[in-house]
Amino acid sequence: MPFPQNSLRAFLRYAKRGLSTAIQSSGRVTLVVGNESADLDSLTSSVLYSYVRSLAPPSGAFTPLYIPLLNIPAAEIRLRPEFEAVFSHANIDASHLVTLDDLPEANERSLDREDTKFVLVDHNSLQGELGKKYAARVQGVIDHHEDEGRVCSETSPESRIIEKCGSCTSLVVRTIRSSWESIAGGSSLASGAAHAQGDSSVNDESMTRTWNAQIAKMALASILIDTANLTAEDKVEEADVEAVKYLESKIKLSPQDAAQWDRDKFYKSIDYAKRNIDAMDFEDILRKDYKQWTEKGLNLGVSSVVKPLDFLIKKLGGDLSEDKQQLFVSSIGDFMATRRLTIFAIMTTFTSKSGEFQRELYVQALSSGYAAAHVFAEQAKVELRIEDHDVASCKELGSVKPLDQGPWYAPLPPLCGPYSTSDDFHSKVDHVNRRKVWLQRDVSKSRKQVAPLMRKAMREAA
């Protein structure tokens, strides 16, 4: 039977118990999972879809309960400070989320493939260990990335929606809107359970509106972040605008939320939390928003970072000396080795001193990835309008020489060091790792466009 309408907190607890029961009893389970970076959009897409679907399951549903799965271990939630900011508005905390830790280990009782169904949100190709085991069990998708053709065309009763949009959550809102409206009256309300969860209000209708407002604010967070509060003209689609309008209407129906609602203030608070990574160490910053793919036997990793490269270099020692830059290169090499990467890219975003939004692109490759990196670099000159780039602070520090950009087929210098082919250079720099840094002039292109271009280059160079 459907889950009776209740708070988001009560639903998440119910979902976690439901997964545990299914594992122990070898029962069926439907998992709604976002991508491996487990960013805010993946979180809110999976939670919103699961919540509404569980309230009003479609005819022929594999199970009446849809379980939102965050595609990271629980310990990595701390790397996403924006989550904590959103939790406070949704009246939930990290312990309520279902994560990879809640799935059985390989040596434990497992979820049988035939008893498992996956719905993908914010990606359309199940990667990693989940993909190796359950890729054939994907039977639904809502996504705004390039279609990889991995999800079958017939997914009924689930949706197969892959289209351009600022936020995947906007597409989820459009998909579940009619179902959410059908249960909005709260006819199956379990008010006793709600009060037990700490949700209080004057009556059942007021309580339902409070719950809806909490869920709406959670969903709004990712849409506003992904579209810069609907100001990113190159990203915003009609679905984003309509979703924001609809979710705000839910907030304004709640007596205790309507009077205090300020969208601009809300957006700024979430955005500040997302960019507040000063306390994180170097590796945690790279892990925070990371995705990985395999093409032709080569592994690609891409990290998105909300600070410029000089911030990352300084994380390793507080200055931009050549020694610290060498430490940066070797630290990237260690990060790659741990994940068996052939090519690794860092995409940074930041605002310049003049207030201009900018992107940097750093790529480091092993010898087996040189050809692919070269193909990518040539294509990116047109597709991304990349330009050779000095790390921003290098020009401001007279003691540090600017980067001399060299070709991919020669060992590249340290980030801010002179180009050299001398024995001395080879003795200081591991020439097996080659790297290059660019300024990306087409700032409208995020990882959503850059990663497919890199993967295409890997296939072409194979």
Image (cartoon, rainbow, N blue to C red):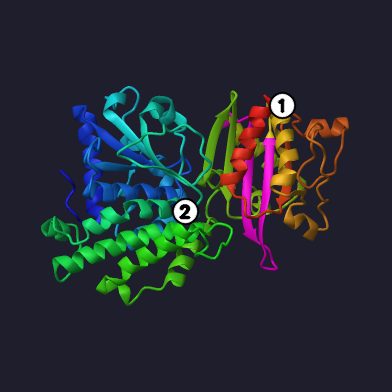
The dot on residue 167 is 2
The dot on residue 438 is none
Asked if residue 361 is among those painted magenta in the image, a careful observer would answer: yes
**Sooner in the amino-acid sequence: mark 1 or mark 2:** 2
Asked if residue 132 is among those painted magenta in the image, a careful observer would answer: no
In space, the residues marked 1 and 2 are separated at their CA atoms by 36 Å
**Can the viewer see residue 437?**
no
Determine the residue located farthest toward the left in the rendered image: 192
Using residue 151 as the reference point, say whether residue 412 is left or right of it.
Answer: right
Q: Over which residues does the magenta segment extend?
A: 338-364
Is 70 drawn above or below residue 298 in the view shown? below
The residue under label 1 is 367
**Residue 110 x/y as whole percent:** 29, 25
Q: Quadrant of residue 31?
A: top left
Q: Which residue lies at the image location 63% right of the left edge and 34% below the top edge?
A: 456
Q: Which residue lies at the image location 77% right of the left edge and 42% below the top edge?
A: 414
Amino acid type for the residue under numbered disc 2:
Ser
User: Which quarter of the figure is the C terminus placed in?
Assistant: top right
Mark 1 element type: helix
Neighbour tally class for label 2: few under 14, some 14-19, many 20 plus, Cα within 10 Å? many
Q: Which residue lies at the image location 21% right of the left edge and 46% below the top edge?
A: 14
Amino acid type for the residue under numbered disc 1:
Ser
**Residue 426 x/y as whole percent:** 81, 31
Neighbour tally class for label 1: few under 14, some 14-19, many 20 plus, Cα within 10 Å? some
- Mark 1 touches mark 2? (CB < 8 Å): no
User: Which quarter of the figure is the N terminus placed in?
Assistant: top left
Count of marks placed on residues: 2
